[in-house]
Image (cartoon, rainbow, N blue to C red):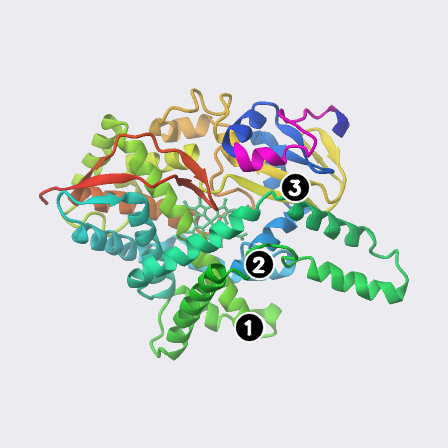
């Protein structure tokens, strides 16, 4: 089969499908997922491909992972926020950093973070008053931000959560605004052109080509970068993270946290040298950003979904009530089995990361089609999670999709909120522990009367509940 046999996404106009990314992204992603396993779409003159089916997903992200890199678009978009951290780096740098960071996320290591997860949820629980009206999405951002701060940086970010949260919201909003814009497509095309010219130019022009290629990995045109609001937001983020690094450097205690490892990590590839300050900053920024926004939105959606399903809520409540007054202070997956299913189902219906962009590094076969080097693909996580042939009655909230028996029946790679393969989320087990621990800790002491209006998902940097999840707090006796 040749690429011409690949179905095209519905709703094309003169500029291609770009308008769908701005106006109706989620319905479009669902329509595309139901069109086929691999579907072509167009942005200006460029064709790219949606990957929508579990088999093709597995092929691209696991079996042939070495034939792909993340799309340069993600590096450009996140350049000012995450630099060359684990999320955006590639090749040898990524391999080395993944090796250095992996021990931090080893299951035995994760147990040591449970007290931070439980402790930060308890702080919120103690603060909330009977009858108070609160936005659970904002509360979850505070909890998740503090958990990352405590577990990974051994720092209490809770008090700065509002300032940091606001700065991050502004910065991510700015980044989000540029996603799928025609000028980003043009910059990616320019990258392709500089690469095609590799080895074809006279020596005096080759130098220009190399410099142009490097420059194109940074944002050439991202309007708003000089807007005082954006400048300040990026400054707040940088300064706060830098302050955490400085605190850690000044501290004499030998603590077993992420920053200690980043500061003292030595790798044979580095010739026994440590990482540069900039690399440490990028990794710290990356983990801080990647480690809370995603978990917070999944928690907010879990509360929302539970508010609409009294039977599921009662089961989570029963699990929470089986713990002592403080909720889970250590992690036992058996004791949080149903709560974990709820969290996983929230991640299916509202995957915080809806799409995983990739670019082929060589000619590659995918889903029975052959694609040339430098083809851009979008792994349509959201669309696949809503496909009928992957999840029966896909719009229904049903935590029992995640019983061990039902999970075993599902095609491999049909549920991939954390991605899959070598670039799988390094924090996936951390998040799958944090979500249920926080839910159970809060529900052990509180119940929430969530306001009954429908909450729409908003495609922000993550898939957030638009307008938040507002609830009236009820205190329960311990
Ligand atoms: C519910 C919570 C979370 C979700 C849904 C999520 C989702 C993801 C996804 C989809 C990827 C892969 C992107 C790709 O393949 O293109 C990823 C990567 C990553 N995540 Fe998460 N994540 C979550 C929590 C966390 C946490 C708690 C941390 C750290 C504390 C974290 C740190 C990272 C990092 C560093 C990467 C890059 C890994 C690499 O490329 O080697 N994430 N995440």
| Place of residue 22 in the rendered image (x, y in percent of width and height, measured from the top left) | 55, 37
Observer-side mark, 2 or 1, equals 2
Would you place residue 351 above or below residue 39 in this image? below
Find numbered disc 2 in the image and state the secondary structure of the residue it sits on: helix
Observer-side mark, 2 or 3, equals 2
Q: Which residue does the image show at 73% across and 47% down from the upper left?
A: 189
Q: Quadrant of the N terminus?
A: top right
Find numbered disc 3 in the image and state the secondary structure of the residue it sits on: loop
Find numbered disc 1 in the image and state the secondary structure of the residue it sits on: loop
Q: Is residue 219 left or right of residue 292?
A: right
Viewer-closest of 120 and 223: 223
Q: Quadrant of the C terminus?
A: top left
State the separation of the CA atoms marked 2 and 3: 26 Å
The residue that mark 1 highlights is: 276
Q: Which secondary structure class fits the magenta region best? A: loop
| Place of residue 175 in the rendered image (x, y in percent of width and height, measured from the top left) | 53, 51
Magenta region, residue range: 5-24
Q: Residues within 10 Å of mark 1 (few under 14, many from 20)?
A: few
Viewer-closest of 386 and 138: 138
**Tag 3–tag 1 contact (CB < 8 Å):** no
Kindly give the residue lying farthest to the left in the view shown.
477
Task: Work out whether residue 241 can be spotted.
Answer: yes
Q: Quadrant of residue 269?
A: bottom right
Which comes sooner in the sequence, label 2 or label 1? 2
Q: Residues within 10 Å of mark 3 (few under 14, many from 20)?
A: some
| Place of residue 89 in the rendered image (x, y in percent of width and height, measured from the top left) | 59, 57
The residue that mark 3 highlights is: 64
């Amino acid at each position: 089969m040749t690429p011409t046999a690949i179905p095209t996404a519905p709703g094309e106009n003169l500029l291609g499908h770009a308008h769908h990314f701005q106006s109706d992204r989620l319905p479009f992603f669902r329509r595309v997922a139901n069109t086929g396993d691999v579907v072509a779409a167009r942005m200006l003159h460029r064709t790219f491909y949606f990957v929508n089916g579990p088999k093709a997903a597995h092929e691209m992200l696991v079996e042939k992972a070495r034939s792909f890199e993340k799309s340069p678009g993600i590096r450009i978009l996140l350049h000012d926020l995450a630099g060359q951290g684990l999320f955006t780096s590639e090749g040898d740098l990524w391999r080395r950093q993944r090796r250095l960071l992996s021990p931090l996320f080893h299951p035995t290591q994760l147990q040591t973070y449970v007290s931070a997860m439980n402790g930060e949820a308890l702080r919120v629980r103690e603060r909330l008053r009977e009858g108070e009206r609160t936005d659970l999405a904002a509360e979850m951002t505070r909890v998740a931000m503090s958990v990352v701060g405590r577990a990974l940086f051994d720092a209490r970010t809770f008090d700065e959560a509002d300032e940091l949260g606001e700065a991050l919201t502004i910065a991510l909003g700015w980044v989000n605004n540029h996603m799928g814009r025609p000028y980003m497509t043009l910059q990616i095309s320019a990258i392709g052109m500089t690469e095609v010219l590799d080895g074809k130019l006279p020596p005096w022009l080759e130098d220009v080509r190399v410099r142009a290629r490097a420059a194109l990995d940074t944002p050439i045109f991202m309007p708003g970068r000089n807007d005082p609001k954006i400048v300040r937001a990026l400054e707040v983020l940088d300064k706060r993270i830098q302050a955490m690094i400085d605190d850690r450097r000044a501290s004499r205690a030998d603590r077993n946290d992420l920053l200690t490892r980043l500061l003292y990590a030595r790798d044979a590839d580095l010739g026994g040298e440590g990482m540069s300050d900039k690399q440490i900053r990028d990794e710290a920024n990356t983990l801080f950003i990647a480690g809370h926004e995603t978990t917070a939105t999944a928690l907010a959606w879990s509360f929302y979904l539970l508010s609409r399903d009294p039977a599921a809520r009662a089961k989570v409540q029963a699990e929470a009530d089986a713990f002592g007054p403080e909720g889970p202070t250590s992690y036992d997956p058996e004791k949080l089995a149903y709560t974990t299913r709820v969290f996983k189902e929230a991640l299916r219906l509202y995957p915080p990361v809806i799409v995983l962009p990739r670019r082929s590094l060589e000619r590659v076969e995918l889903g029975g089609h052959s694609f040339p080097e430098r083809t851009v693909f979008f792994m349509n996580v959201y669309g696949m999670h809503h496909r009928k042939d992957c999840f029966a009655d896909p719009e229904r909230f049903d935590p029992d999709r995640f019983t061990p028996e039902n999970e075993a029946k599902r095609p491999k790679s049909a549920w991939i909120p954390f991605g899959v393969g070598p670039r799988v989320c390094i924090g996936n087990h951390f998040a799958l522990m944090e979500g249920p621990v926080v839910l159970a800790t809060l529900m052990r002491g509180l119940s929430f009367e969530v306001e009954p209006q429908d909450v729409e998902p908003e495609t922000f940097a993550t898939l957030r509940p638009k307008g938040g999840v507002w609830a009236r707090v009820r205190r329960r006796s311990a």
